[in-house]
């Protein structure tokens, strides 16, 4: 497929060795395969102290020229994008590379016509329709920085993100389809924009044909605007280190932070990791089920596949509508050969029973992928047996919004595969494990904090508007290292198994939330004085959200209070962050210095109260008894 594809374990070992001994030569060879307007002056400059990381310094390029234009000669009539509706009866839509190129240019012209220019931040809040993919690429085409906000976030969450990045434009739709439901997206945007003075223009794509409130002078319809523009739009020349996009993600403290990725390094890393992990072939029909609102959608639905000239499938719907066979029906319909989804989806389909998967042939599938959270062995084996028919490798891909692309993963049929293990790092990735004293664990069969000791092209450059926050969050815990926030084990063969977060971050169905962020939302409720949120094991979501709340007075109707708290969280963050359990308590287990002992709360939430550890240092040990007795 590409000159940089590693095809055997021997080649992997060779490439890995070279990537450590001569990282600049290793990455230069890969970067050479792309279209650059001007070649870089220096492959890498870095320090993890500030941090300051520059890849392909001085290089000039545009990522859409690499996603689209450069394929036109050889793959112009090849399918670039297949879009499948939420409704199985609605006809699918296909775009060849030539057609997608044209649509992106048109959208880019609409953006320019409406005043957008290089460097502007543009918020995209859109359903999973083709225009979303096109809009993202159109921003990149003109050098505007896209900030996609997942459609499940609330108006308040969107407003925070728009204000943080000072976006001048919002791209949206009238509404969206999700299973049997329809959601008025534009109404959410209107609400958000009441507190977003930086936004001058809103471009609305029609999806449902609903009547929506348009603000005169600010809002325009895409279908009107597109009539005014042409189909040519030369790509803006970007510096390799110019910002490509911002994507907000949660951390252990404060509001979500805007992770910044830049043009050159992200491009190289997205394509390299995509074609190597999945061992992509020219004829593949590739489907990643993630929403473009998450990093997985950015890198492995959109950029990675298009950079590789692959046919990528985009799906508007959900796994269980109209029934839990929907994924498999779509796989058979398009002959999907590489399928990439999340453990939470696998577990929910597993719970719906085998019949739904057994009624489809799935003959076209050759590689399966998993992402977002640890995949438990039961789900791994089910996926391998019923979807992969015992013949397809399952690649468990570990990475983060901050890493830009896959870091540790089996490369399909190339490197060793072991259930529930991400496996070996990709060449160019240098993970290390650190013990609780901050020392490197050099042996195998160890467990520690997962860090990276060397930069890779797809890594985070800064957190938007607050570089110090980037340093504090990722580069200050262990000197000279990037800290992932995850704990991991390394087995006797050097394969990594990710345990999960070691910080106050909860991973709900593969989506990240800070406990502090959810607590802040809960505390907005007028009856709540204080709250503490922890994650607990959940059969489908991986982790559920368990909230302990202290109220002004003991509520007469606890269910009513719970419903109100849920409502507050939904309005501050979104439906995806709804607490699963809310326990009203009279106090929280705190140390004398006032720190909440979450360890105890986690045990209660897990239902494991046999050994709560030492509670003697607590301010009020009795409160623990009450909490244990009232556990849900
Ligand atoms: C966190 C990053 C990577 C895109 C989706 C999530 C967890 C991710 C795995 C995996 C175990 C995983 C980690 C990581 N995670 N993939 N294969 N095995 N855990 O991106 O929202 O930035 O979350 O997801 O805890 O730190 P994200």
Image (cartoon, helix red, strand yellow):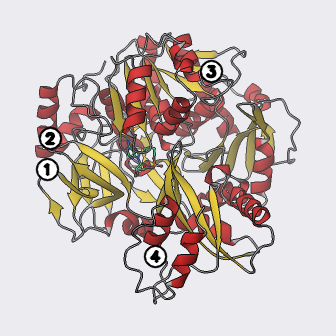
Q: Residues within 10 Å of mark 3 (few under 14, many from 20)?
A: many
Separation (CA) of disc 1 from disc 3: 45 Å
Upstream in sequence: badge 1 or badge 3: 3
Q: CA distance from mark 3 to mark 2?
A: 42 Å
Judged by depth in the image, the label closer to the viewer, 1 or 3, is: 1
Residues at marks 4 and 2 touching, judged by CB atoms closer than 8 Å: no
- Give the labeled residue for mark 2: 493
Secondary structure beneath dot 3 equals strand
Mark 4 or 2, nearer chain start: 2
Of residue 626 and residue 402, the one placed in the foreground of this image is: 626
In the picture of the structure, the residue carrying the numbered disc 3 is 84
Residue drawn where x is 27% and y is 30% of the image? 411
What is the number of the mark on residue 444?
A: 1
**Residue with the mark numbered 4:** 597
Mark 1 vs mark 4, foreground winner is 4
Q: Residues within 10 Å of mark 1 (few under 14, many from 20)?
A: some
Residue 98 appears in the figure: yes
Mark 3 CB in 8 Å range of ligand 1?
no
Separation of residues labelled 4 and 3 (CA atoms): 47 Å
Mark 1 vs 3: CB contact within 8 A: no
Disc 4: CA contacts within 10 A as few (<14), some (14-19) or many (>=20): some
Quarter assignment of residue 365: top left
- Residue 516 at x, y = what percent? 55, 68
Of mark 1 and mark 4, the one earlier in the sequence is 1
**Is residue 309 visible to us here?**
no
Q: Residue at x 28, y 45 (%)?
A: 497
Q: Residues within 10 Å of mark 2 (few under 14, many from 20)?
A: few
The residue tagged with tag 2: helix, strand or loop?
loop
């Amino acid at each position: 497929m590409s000159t940089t594809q590693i095809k055997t374990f021997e080649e992997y070992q060779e490439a890995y060795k070279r990537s450590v001994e001569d990282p600049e030569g290793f990455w230069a060879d890969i970067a050479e395969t792309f279209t650059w307007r001007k070649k870089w002056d220096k492959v890498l400059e870095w320090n993890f102290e500030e941090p300051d990381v520059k890849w392909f310094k001085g290089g000039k390029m545009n990522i859409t020229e690499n996603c689209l234009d450069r394929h036109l000669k050889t793959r112009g009539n090849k399918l670039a994008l297949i879009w499948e509706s939420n409704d199985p009866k609605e006809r699918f839509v296909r775009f060849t590379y030539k057609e997608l190129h044209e649509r992106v240019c048109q959208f880019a012209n609409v953006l320019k016509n409406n005043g957008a220019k290089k460097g502007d931040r543009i918020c995209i809040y859109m359903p999973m329709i083709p225009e979303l993919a096109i809009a993202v690429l159109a921003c990149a085409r003109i050098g505007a920085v896209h900030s996609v906000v997942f459609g499940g976030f609330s108006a308040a969450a969107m407003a925070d993100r728009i204000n943080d990045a000072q976006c001048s434009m919002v791209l949206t739709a009238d509404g969206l389809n999700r299973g049997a439901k329809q959601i008025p997206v534009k109404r959410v945007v209107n609400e958000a924009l009441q507190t977003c003075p930086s936004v001058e223009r809103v471009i609305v794509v029609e999806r449902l044909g609903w009547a929506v409130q348009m603000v005169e002078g600010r809002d325009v319809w895409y279908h009107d605007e597109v009539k005014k523009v042409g189909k040519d739009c030369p790509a803006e020349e970007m510096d390799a280190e110019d910002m490509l996009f911002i994507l907000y993600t949660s951390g252990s403290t404060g509001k979500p932070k805007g992770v910044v990725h830049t043009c050159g390094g992200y491009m190289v890393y997205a394509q390299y990791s995509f074609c190597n992990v999945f061992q992509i072939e020219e004829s593949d029909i590739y489907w990643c089920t993630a929403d473009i609102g998450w990093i997985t959608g950015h890198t492995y639905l959109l950029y990675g596949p298009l950079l590789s000239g692959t046919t990528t499938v985009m799906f508007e719907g959900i796994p269980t509508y109209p029934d839990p066979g929907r994924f498999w029906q779509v796989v058979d319909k398009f002959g999907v050969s590489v399928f990439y989804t999340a453990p939470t989806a696998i577990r929910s389909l597993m719970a719906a029973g085998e019949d739904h998967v057994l009624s489809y042939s799935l003959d076209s599938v050759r590689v399966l992928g998993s992402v977002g959270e640890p995949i438990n062995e039961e789900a791994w084996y089910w996926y391998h047996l019923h979807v992969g028919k015992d013949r397809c490798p399952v690649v468990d891909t570990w990475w983060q919004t901050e890493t830009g692309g896959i870091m540790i993963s089996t490369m399909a049929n190339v490197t060793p595969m072991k259930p529930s293990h991400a496996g070996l790092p990709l060449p160019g990735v240098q993970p290390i494990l650190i013990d609780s004293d901050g020392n490197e664990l050099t042996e195998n069969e160890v467990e520690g904090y997962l860090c990276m000791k060397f930069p890779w092209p797809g890594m985070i450059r800064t957190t938007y508007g607050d570089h110090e926050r980037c340093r504090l969050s990722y580069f200050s815990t262990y000197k000279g290292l990037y800290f992932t926030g995850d704990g991991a084990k390394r087995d006797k063969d050097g394969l990594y198994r990710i345990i999960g977060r070691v910080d106050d971050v909860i991973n709900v169905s593969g989506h990240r939330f800070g406990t502090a962020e959810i607590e802040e939302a809960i505390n907005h409720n007028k009856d709540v004085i204080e709250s503490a949120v922890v994650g607990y094991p959940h059969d489908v979501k991986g982790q559920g959200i368990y909230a302990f709340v202290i109220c002004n007075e003991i509520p007469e109707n606890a269910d009513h209070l719970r419903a109100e708290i849920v409502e507050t969280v939904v309005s501050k963050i979104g439906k995806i962050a709804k607490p699963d359990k809310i326990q009203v308590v009279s106090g929280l287990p705190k140390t004398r210095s006032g720190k909440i002992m979450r360890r105890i709360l986690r045990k209660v939430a897990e239902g494991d109260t046999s050994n709560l550890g030492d509670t003697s240092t607590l301010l009020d040990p009795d409160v623990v008894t009450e909490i244990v007795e009232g556990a849900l």
